[in-house]
Image (cartoon, rainbow, N blue to C red):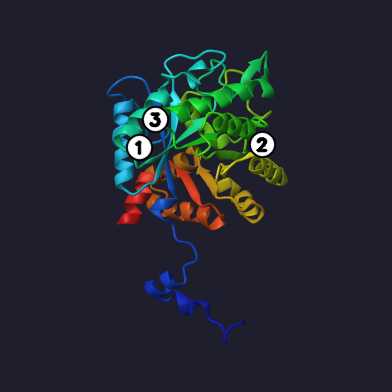
Amino acid sequence: MLFPDYRPRRMRQNEAFRKMVRETALSVNDLILPLFAIDGKGVKNPIESMPGHHQLSIDNLVKVARQAFDLGIPAIILFGIPSKKDPLGTQAYAKDGIIQRTVKAVKNKVPELVVITDVCLCEYTDHGHCGFVDGHTVDNDASLDLLARTALSHAKAGADMVAPSDMMDGRVAEIRSILDENDFSQIPIMSYAAKYCSAFYGPFRQAAQSAPTFGDRRTYQMDPANAREAIREATMDVEEGADIIMVKPALPYLDIICRLRDEVDLPMAAYNVSGEYAMIKAAEKMGWIDGQKVMMESLTAIKRAGADMILTYFAMEAAALING
């Protein structure tokens, strides 16, 4: 089809036409809101690098969860900031841990809201790594039991879904096994299947107080230069029992989302991470961009690439805009 026989502008000449031929439609149902839980009462600590977001005590977090649900957002994902840390991250799987108590409180007050829990040890260990550390090495196999125990404790507290983000080999199978053995076969696993060792996580580590005290996470998170490896990682997680696979970060890895969409027929999530959020908010504050338009364009791009759901700090703002 060549000009003048084909004129693409015909279908762009007014908003009605543009809506009729629009290929990607962003919905509130696509959004998942990350929230940070901390001990205390009436606590609302601003996260400086993530304007509009806070470390929240359980009472305040429940209020935000209710607001999210009232906007039509179907799910939240919880990250915990414990009052104490130790080498084994014991507060990650403690019966009265911060996440376990938060899950119970949210499900009590907003039972229809889907509560997803992040399963990792980095927020709970005094060294800040995502697994068991032997010397200066993260021991993959020794970490699996701790991660499985964490997932099980979340399920017992009432979580609707667990999301392992640690990037230890074999953790999906270990978690699926312990859930099934304890009569939680109905709990889905959202696997951080392709989680890259990214500089875009900086603001999150401030929010979750989870930066490693030595080294970095390159021995377990993926090399940003690799694409074929993401297919292997996702395929392994699918075979181990994942119900949803995730790519993290989102915007710098749209090619990975697209490739995995072609390779894997499970639902796909993408995490629009803290650095992506912070850059847009900073540029908006400086007056360099229209923040709302860039937000919506970014989220639409993530969905267009193939994501079925988007974990994003823009969830509340985007939902309000979509709802009109």
Left or right relative to 180: residue 70? left
Does 77 sit above or below residue 139? below
Asked if the residues shown at circle 1 and circle 2 are in contact, with their CB atoms under 8 angstroms apart, the answer is no
Residue 79 at what x, y percent from top left?
Answer: 45, 30
Q: Is residue 273 above or below residue 157?
A: below
| Element class at badge 2 | loop
- How much space separates mark 1 and mark 2, taking CA atoms? 30 Å
What's the CA distance linking mark 3 and mark 2?
A: 30 Å
Numbered tag placed on residue 222 in the rendering: 2
Element class at badge 1: loop
The residue under label 3 is: 103
Q: Dot 2 surroundings within 10 Å: few (below 14), some, or many (20 or more)? A: many
Q: CA distance from mark 3 to mark 1?
A: 22 Å
Q: Position of residue 24 (x, y in %)?
A: 48, 62
Nearest the eye: 221 or 46: 221
Residue 295 spot, x, y in % from top left: 43, 50
Say whether residue 317 is left or right of residue 279. Answer: left
Residue under the point 52% across and 13% down: 86
Q: Could you tell me which quadrant the N terminus lies in? A: bottom right
